[in-house]
Amino acid sequence: MEAPPKPKYVMLSDNHHQASLRPPPYRRNVPRYHSKAHGGGGGIGCCLKCICCCYCFLFFIIFALFGLGYFFFYYFNPQIPSYKVTNFRVHAFNVKSDFSLYTEFIVIVKADNPNENIDFIYGRDSSVSVMYSESELCAGKIPDFRQPAKNVTDISIMLSGNSEFGSGLQEALMQNRHSGKIPLLVEVKVPVTVVVGSLSLKKVYVFVNCSLVVDNLSPNKKVGILSSNYTYGASL
C-alpha cells in the first residue's frame, strides 16, 4: 500500500500575502467620443461657406452702389429746377346772365435749370388750371419741350374755360376785385424726364402749386402780382 500523495503547500510570507490580496489599482475609464459621419460635418461647413459668400457679395453690392451714388452726386451735382410765375395776363373775363363765367388767361412761368450736365424733357400729358375759392376758372397745357442744362426758359401757357359760378361766388369775386386783392391758385402737373448726359432716367410727375394774389382781373389791363407762394411735389 502506497501512502497518498502529500498536498503541496506554498508558504507565503506576510508581505507577499498582503501584496497578493491587495485589490487592483483603480483605473479611470476615459469616455470615448466617436465622431459623426463625415457627411453631416461637411454639410454644415458648406452652409457656413455659402452664408459667408452671400454676406460678402451683399457687402460688395452695397459698397458699389454707395460708390456710384457718391460719384454721381460729386460729378453731376444735381439741383432741383425752380419755377416762378412772372406774368399774368387777362384776355377775357365775362360774367354771363346765367351765372357762368368765361375767362381767358395767359400765364408766363420762368423755369430755371441750374444743372450743368442734366437736361429736362417736359412731356405732353400736362395740365394747368387756375382756381378761385376751390372752383376752376380755366385750364390749359404746357407745351412739350426739352430744356438744356444751364438754361432759363419762359413758358407761355394759354388757359381758357367756361365755369358755372353761383351768385355767392360771383359776389365774393366782385368784392375781391373792388378791394384790389384777388386770391388765385395755379395748379401745375407735368411729366418730366431727367436726362443725365446721354442717359434718360425714369419719367416722374412734377406738381407745382402757386398761390397768387393779384390786384385785378380786368381784360387787357396789366395785372400786378402782389404776393406768391410755391409748393412742390413729385411722384413716379
Image (spheres, helix red, strand yellow):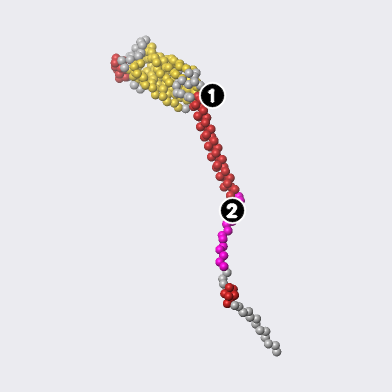
Q: Describe the element under mark 2 as helix, strand or loop.
A: loop
* Residue drawn 47% across the image and 24% down it: 78
Q: In x, y percent, where is residue 79?
A: 46, 23
- Mark 2 — residue? 36
Q: Which mark is residue 226?
A: none
- Mark 1 — residue? 199
* Residue drawn 49% across the image and 19% down it: 149
Does 30 sit left or right of 103 as displayed? right
Q: Main secondary structure of the magenta part?
A: loop
Above or below 133: residue 46: below
Q: In x, y percent, where is residue 50?
A: 57, 42
Q: Which residues are magenta?
A: 25-39
Instruction: Name the quadrant of the N terminus.
Output: bottom right
User: Is residue 79 visible in the rendered structure shown here?
Assistant: yes
Q: Nearer the viewer, residue 191 or 81?
A: 81
Q: Residues within 10 Å of mark 1 (few under 14, many from 20)?
A: few
